[in-house]
Image (spheres, helix red, strand yellow):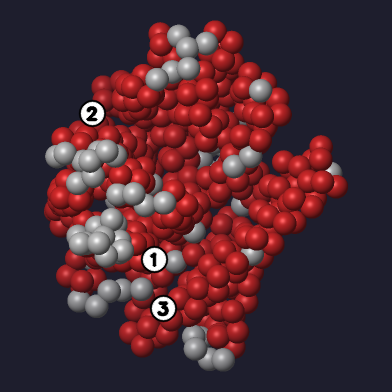
């Protein structure tokens, strides 16, 4: 990825927006952005209005774990053909259409479940929970396939534009599923004081119908050219794939069970270590959660390995599906370069994600009203993120991925300093608009460059698997650290916390310099 290509003219860069694949990614991004808030914010609002206990509402966020662990079943999506559909639509479009139909089905199931109950009977929360799990799994599967399609459907030079278009569509989808759904439910007559199941049912039906945008796009676009993974599919029978699917279910089930049931033990261990090492409480907590995740993965892998030993799946098939993509990445780069790349992937977005976890709480603590937050942070912020994505895409095409990756890293850290100014000035709406605008513009630019960077690291032979691993790693460690943002703010205050998040971005710049010559 050394950038020796001649500089593109502005006219060539602008014409890239009219490329059919760039337009395609806008619609597919919209389809990918719809499901997320139907599990988080929008569903939480519905359950709250229906009178569901707050403790039960928060459990539904677990349904979105598929987004964090999608790399576990990405190899299955990458290799396993779907009967009849793969022959009709092709490998990528078959899985994409299947995931979109399942997303629509899950949303419709949720639409026809009243969490408040019928005629005095208890609410059907179990059915709602299973539908939410189906939605999370299907949405994460759609993400896997769309990411693979984006990388395979066009040349490397166009990846930044595809990323920017995808991000714009994703944000618009989130806006429709979030603010749009809440506004529609309110318009149809539902509120905390006067709950209306009919209003929420019609709202979720309307959102389900919006998924037709993605499905019709999938049926209209061409299948990307086959790569090595498609050829490998011919080596295995349907029975072998069925047994492989059972192996995946067993390994994934063991991983989930170990991860959840180790929660109380991890919490007790963190509490004990915090008492022993009070000055290192945050670091210790982060390490405990990291070990918990690693142990859960190892136990799940051990269970799968045991089933392989019993002859459920051949070792060669397991190696070709799971080990080969990892081995390919490690053989293409030196050990030093692999370490630098993995650190960069894991921590590039640490500054904005850690800050973002507590940003809404900060706005409220500072004295901004909910209406100000909705208008400035959500609506205006969304517009600036989309603008930043398009700007970042154009600049990446013109100046190269690494240069824009560095610029994005500098801006992401620098804009966090603006939050220090806001914390000292207080609830000034104009200053909030400046800070949010700069922060979201920088985030959009950095995201477009970073997605293009991750795409360039992906081997065309293992597109879905490698990108799923990269995208999961991209948010895993920042989210783990972000979980302690409230504790850090309590200890050192908002101004020093924002300075700390800015300083976290400085090592990232060194990592970008170290990987600047990666091809």
| SS label for mark 1 | helix
Query: x, y (%) of residue 10?
Result: 30, 20
In the rendered structure, the answer to whether residue 115 lies left or right of residue 156 reads: left
**In this orientation, does residue 207 appear?**
no
| SS label for mark 2 | helix
Q: Residue at the location (38% across, 81% down)? A: 241
The Cα–Cα distance between marks 1 and 2, rounded to whole angstroms, is 32 Å
In this rendering, which labeled residue sits more in front, label 3 or label 2?
3
Rendered view: 234 above or below 124: below
Where does label 2 land, which residue?
A: 15
- For disc 2, the neighbor class at 10 Å (few under 14, some 14 to 19, many from 20) is few
For marks 3 and 2, the one nearer the N-term is 2
Residue farthest toward the right in the current orientation of the protein: 276
In this rendering, which labeled residue sits more in front, label 1 or label 2?
1
For marks 1 and 2, the one nearer the N-term is 2
Q: Residue at the location (44% across, 14% down)? A: 432
Query: x, y (%) of residue 125?
Result: 34, 62
Where does label 3 land, which residue?
A: 245
Where does label 1 land, which residue?
A: 78
For marks 3 and 1, the one nearer the N-term is 1
Query: x, y (%) of residue 204?
Result: 20, 50
Q: Residue at the location (61% across, 52% down)? A: 333
Q: Residue at the location (56% across, 48% down)? A: 476
**In this orientation, does residue 153 appear?**
yes
In the rendered structure, the answer to whether residue 349 lies left or right of residue 382 reads: right
In this rendering, which labeled residue sits more in front, label 3 or label 1?
3
Q: Nearer the viewer, residue 422 or 202?
A: 202
């Amino acid at each position: 990825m050394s950038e020796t290509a001649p500089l593109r003219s502005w006219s060539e860069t602008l014409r890239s927006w009219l490329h059919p694949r760039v337009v395609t990614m806008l619609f597919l991004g919209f389809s990918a952005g719809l499901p997320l808030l139907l599990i988080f914010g929008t569903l939480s609002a519905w359950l709250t209005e229906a009178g569901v206990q707050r403790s039960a509402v928060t459990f539904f966020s677990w349904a979105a774990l598929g987004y964090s662990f999608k790399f576990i079943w990405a190899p299955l999506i990458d290799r396993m053909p779907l009967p009849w559909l793969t022959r009709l639509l092709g490998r990528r479009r078959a899985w994409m259409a299947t995931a979109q139909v399942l997303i629509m089905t899950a949303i419709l199931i949720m639409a026809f479940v009243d969490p408040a109950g019928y005629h005095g009977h208890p609410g059907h929360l179990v059915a709602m929970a299973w539908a939410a799990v189906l939605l999370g799994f299907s949405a994460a599967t759609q993400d896997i396939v769309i990411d693979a399609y984006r990388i395979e459907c066009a040349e490397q030079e166009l990846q930044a534009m595809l990323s920017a278009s995808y991000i714009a569509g994703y944000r618009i989808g989130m806006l429709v599923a979030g603010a749009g759904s809440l506004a529609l439910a309110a318009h149809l007559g539902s509120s905390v004081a006067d709950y209306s199941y009919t209003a929420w049912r019609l709202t979720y039906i309307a959102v389900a119908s919006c998924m037709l945008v993605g499905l019709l796009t999938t049926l209209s676009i061409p299948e990307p050219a086959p790569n090595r993974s498609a050829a490998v599919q011919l080596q295995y029978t349907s029975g072998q794939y069925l047994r492989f699917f059972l192996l995946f279910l067993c390994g994934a089930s063991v991983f989930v069970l170990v991860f959840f049931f180790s929660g109380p033990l991890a919490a007790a261990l963190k509490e004990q270590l915090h008492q022993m090492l009070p000055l290192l409480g945050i670091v210790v907590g982060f390490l405990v959660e990291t070990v918990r995740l690693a142990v859960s993965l190892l136990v799940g892998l051990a269970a799968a390995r045991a089933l392989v030993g019993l002859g459920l799946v051949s070792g060669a098939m397991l190696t070709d599906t799971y080990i080969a993509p990892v081995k390919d990445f490690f053989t293409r780069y030196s050990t030093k370069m692999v370490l630098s790349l993995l650190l960069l992937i894991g921590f590039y977005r640490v500054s904005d994600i850690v800050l973002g976890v507590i940003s809404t709480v900060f706005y409220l603590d500072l004295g901004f009203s909910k209406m100000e937050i909705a208008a400035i942070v959500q609506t205006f912020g969304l517009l600036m993120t989309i603008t930043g994505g398009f700007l970042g895409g154009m600049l990446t095409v013109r100046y190269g991925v690494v240069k824009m990756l560095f610029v994005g890293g500098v801006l992401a850290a620098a804009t966090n300093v603006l939050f220090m100014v806001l914390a000292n000035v207080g609830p000034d709406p104009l200053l909030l608009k400046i800070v949010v605008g700069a922060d979201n513009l920088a985030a959009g630019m950095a995201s477009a460059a970073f997605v293009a960077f991750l795409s360039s690291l992906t081997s065309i032979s293992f597109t879905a698997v490698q990108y799923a691993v990269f995208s999961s790693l991209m948010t895993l460690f920042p989210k783990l650290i972000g979980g302690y943002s409230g504790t850090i703010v309590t200890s050192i205050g908002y101004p020093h916390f924002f300075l700390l998040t800015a300083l976290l971005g400085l090592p990232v710049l060194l990592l970008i310099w170290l990987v600047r010559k990666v091809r």
